[in-house]
Structures are given as structure tokens and as C-alpha cells.
Image (cartoon, rainbow, N blue to C red):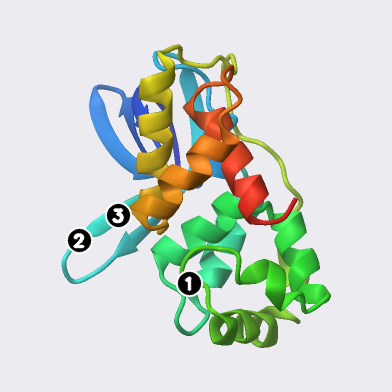
Amino acid sequence: MIGRLRGQIVFKHPPQLLLDVGGVGYELEAPMSTFYDLPAVGDTVTLVTHLLVREDAQVLYGFAREQERALFRRLLKVTGIGARSALAILSGMDAARFAQCIEQEDVDALIRMPGIGRKTAQRLVVELRDRLDAIPDSVSTLVGDRGRDGGGREQAMTDAVSALVALGYRPIDATRMVRLADDGVGGAEEIIRNALRAASGR
């Protein structure tokens, strides 16, 4: 099992990134909560990881914090929640906010996440209500300068739409969300952050 990786960021395009670890390139997928804090391409980063083995693929997921990985693993144990839905949840709200939704049985907030219907949200509340207290505190494992990649507005908006589609939003909805979230200043990651905040009602 691969539990942690430290290496140089070669490529990042939410939700995917490529990490060069001693000359070996590791492809990972990560939630937006991790992407927001990633340093620039070329910088070194340390991520805790989870390897998911399926019949048709082996996918490595990276997280900035142990808390995120722990929640991801808990979510995978919930009936009807797959890795894509778990990434979408972690991208839409941080672990503390998610735990608050579960504790308060805030189903309406949960169904704003892509792929989470009312029945699934209710199942999340029932199955996780007594299991979130063991999730460790949020401690970042990131190393390096937290720079932002440059790029034109069109490319930033295109990248933001692609990331939201990868998280489960329909292309038409992702495009609308990006247009509303674009402030004309920030890069793709800032646009995605604003779009997901608006979608979750924050």
C-alpha cells in the first residue's frame, strides 16, 4: 500500500496531478480542498495517499491532510458512495463543515453536492452520524511555496469547467457555475472554489 508520496509536481489539472518521485511519475486524483493549497508546478509537495484497487483499474488518490484521507475512506464505506462522489463531497466542503452537516442532519446542504440525492444524503447521515468523531484533526502535509499558475482568462475558465465536470456536474451546469463564479482576477482554482462555495450555499 502506498501511504504517502513526496515529490515534484509535474502537472496539475483538477482533479488530476502528476508527481515525480525519484524519477517515477505517479498519477493521482485529489479533491479541490487539496488543489487549493498545492504549490506551483515544479515545486515539491508531500501528500498522504489512498490506493483504490478495482477490477478495471488502480487509482491513487492524494490528500493534503490526514483528515481528508480519513473522511474519504469513511465515505467509501457508505452504501452508494463511490470514489467520484467522495471526491465531490470533499471538493464541495471541508471535513469540518461535512461533519457539521452530518451532526445537524442538514440533508439540504448535502444534496447540493453533485451525485448526492436526498436518499443518499439521508444514508450519509444515518451511516456516519456516530463515526466521524474518530477522524483526526486537520493538519496539512503540504511542502513548498503555495504559488498559483498563471494563464489567460479563457484557459482558466475552460480548466474550471473541466474540473467541475470531472467532479460530476453536467457540462451545462459547470459552464453556468463558472460564468457566475469568475471574478476576472483569480485563476482556475479560485474560480472552482467560488463556484463550489456558491453551489453549497456558503
Between 178 and 136, the one lying in front of the other is: 178
- Secondary structure of the residue carrying tag 1 is helix
Residue at the spot 36% in from the left edge and 22% down from the top edge: 155
Task: Name the residue beneath numbered marker 1.
Answer: 76
Residue 125 placement, left or right of 27: right
Residue contact between numbered discs 2 and 1, judged by CB atoms under 8 Å: no
Indicate left or right for 26 with 138 as reference.
Answer: left
Q: Residue 57 carries which label?
A: 2
Mark 1 or mark 3, earlier in chain: 3
Find the distance from the CA under tag 2 to the CA under tag 3: 6 Å
Q: Report x, y in % for residue 144.
A: 56, 17
Q: Where is 43 relative to 125, above or below?
A: above
Q: Name the residue under label 3.
A: 59
Left or right side of 17 for 131: right
Task: Give the answer, above or below, for where 117 lies relative to 35.
Answer: below
Amino acid type, label 2: Ala
| Residue under the image location 60 percent in, 71 percent down | 111
Using the rendered view, name the quadrant where residue 57 is placed. Answer: bottom left
Q: Residues within 10 Å of mark 1 (few under 14, many from 20)?
A: some
Q: How far apart are marks 2 and 1 (CA)?
A: 16 Å
